[in-house]
Amino acid sequence: MTPEQLSDVVRSAVAAAVERGTLAVDVPDAVVIDRPKNPEHGDYATNVAMRLAKPAGRPPREVAEAVAAELRAATGIAAVDVAGPGFLNITLAKDALGQVAVNAVTAGEAYGRTDTLAGQRLNLEFVSANPTGPVHIGGTRWAAVGDALGRLLTASGAEVSREYYFNDAGSQIDRFSASLMAAANGRPVPEDGYAGDYIGEIAGQVVAAEPGVLELPEDAQQERFRVHGVELMFAEIKRSLAGFGVVFDTYFSEKTLHDSGALDKAVARLREQGHVYESDGAVWLRTTDFADDKDRVLVKSDGEPTYFAADCAYYLDKRERGFDRVVIMLGADHTGYVGRYKALVAAMGDDPATNLEILIGQLVNLVRNGEPVRMSKRAGTVVNLEDLVDAIGADAARYALARASVDQTIDLDLDAWTRKTNDNPVFYVQYAHARIASLLRGATDLGLPLGEAGDVDTALLETQRESDLLRAIAEFPQVVSSAAELRAPHRVARYLEELAGTYHRFYDSCRVLPRGDEEATPLTTARLWLCAATATVLRNGLTVLGVSAPERM
């Protein structure tokens, strides 16, 4: 029985007490189930009686006794004690707790999935680095966290579309194409241009693909470097992200907004809402009506649309594609962007609290041998995605970047994340999975397959270490759903580390396979199911983070 299942049992007990007339309250939509810090207080605890005391007009302990009487008659409940001011401490029947192992193994990849976010249609935009250079370390963090979040949201029942918005229009593309053209002609890169070995590499690829490009007039030449250079750069960005295990459902071009008239359409929509005005020859959006610190220009006095106008058009496009909620992941340097984006959503007639969500992530500092790592020769300025993968591997990089809350700055020690020791978190979790895989192979070699689910006696799993592991396995669906709702993939990583530690303690205390001439017993089978269940959860949790679960290490 998982905490979610127990929550339903407690709700049913409350409903039974109401029907019997011993309580006069509305049955709560949800009941919070916790694990007591002291195992002697039972497997689980709930404060539902304390929450119902006021509406019932009775002391909490009286309410608790009424609910406890119903719970004691429920299937799978061994004991219920009323404690303190009205807590209910619940001990499950051994077979009910042990059944968690069977449920996890039989559910396989589906174990941990819920429908808590069913019905939500989300557009999740992350990375969205300009196609003017390789994905830097900040974008790499968003790649790891964003992809994990997309997996979490999907596992919780939401319909999620992952989107990459690339700014292939505007001044930064002008500077990029000018840098390529300068490199191809053997000239220094402009002062405001882009540096790094990759500029020369891409310039060379453009010349190889279009041998006559350097004979064109300057304007025509720069246009060819713009078109072909952006195409090559973005192809490389997509390739490096795919190598990191991150593939988007949609790659959205800013240029298409300009070419399709979407900007004019968005300005017209805002004008219809009554929030557009003209001043000093420019077109403005009155965002101060929606708590922004100043109004924003949509079209400059020279007739050129602003980036903000493109943001308005892009948001409108997402909503017209049917997304209920637009989720955008941005770096710490975009904090000031939040207020104006909320204002544009409100100006469109939407509710920012419902239709928009912006997540701000903090910086990543890399350290090696105690010294900061800042430079990448190829990128020219900062460490990029491929540098990090080359240094510690894709699995370690994804795990390390997803393991911390996004609102925390990460100091990532490259030496620590390459060690094959238990103080390396990803190694610790992956080793637990590999250790179980080895054990199950050994069981097969001994002629001890798991067998059928109906043949295992889970009531035999009654030691403290076994109970601890079962309760940890039972928590996984709740961990996934809460991590999705809180947009916190790091909760899954921390849970996996705790689960791995709980498994190692179980394995050190409880012999699983028979030794020498010993005969296998029903307890052997029950413990094999418990090990297989742990492997299932470790594998599913690592999959949520986009990290592999090796069979051998």
Image (cartoon, rainbow, N blue to C red):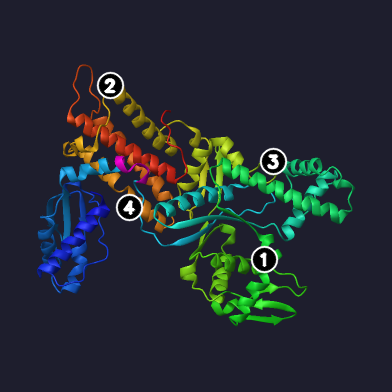
- Circle 1 SS class: helix
**Which residue is depicted at the point 19% across and 73% down?**
55
Q: Where is residue 196 in the image (x, y as percent from the top left)?
A: 72, 44
Let me know if residue 97 is in the magenta part. Answer: no
Mark 3–mark 1 CB contact (< 8 Å): no
Q: In this view, does 493 lie to the left or right of 96?
A: right
Q: Is residue 249 visible?
A: yes
Q: Which of marks 2 and 1 is nearer the N terminus?
A: 1
Q: What residue type is labelled 2?
A: Leu
User: How far separated are the C-alphas under marks 2 and 4?
Assistant: 36 Å
Q: Where is residue 552 in the image (x, y as percent from the top left)?
A: 42, 28
Name the element at disc 2. loop
Report the residue that reaches farthest toward the top: 517
Q: Nearer the viewer, residue 414 or 483?
A: 483
Q: Does the magenta stretch include residue 109?
A: yes
As measured in the structure, the alpha-carbon distance from the residue carrying label 2 to the one carrying label 1 is 66 Å
Q: Residue 307's mark?
A: 1
Which class describes the residues within 10 Å of circle 2: few (<14), some (14-19), or many (20+)?
few
Q: Which residues, given as a range, are shown in magenta?
A: 105-110
Considering only order in the chain, which callout, 3 or 2, is on the residue closer to the N terminus?
A: 3
Q: Give the alpha-carbon distance from disc 4 to disc 3, as whole Å.
A: 43 Å
**Distance (Cα) linking label 4 and label 1:** 41 Å
Viewed as shown, does residue 112 lie left or right of 286?
left
Q: Which mark is residue 446?
A: 2
- Element marked by disc 3: loop
Label 4 amino acid? Gln
Mark 2 or 4, closer to the camera = 2
Mark toward the viewer: 2 or 1? 2
* Amino acid at circle 3: Arg
Q: Which residue is label 4 attached to?
A: 478
- Give the mark, 3 or 1, whose residue is nearer the N terminus: 1
Q: In this view, does 387 lie above or below 364?
A: above
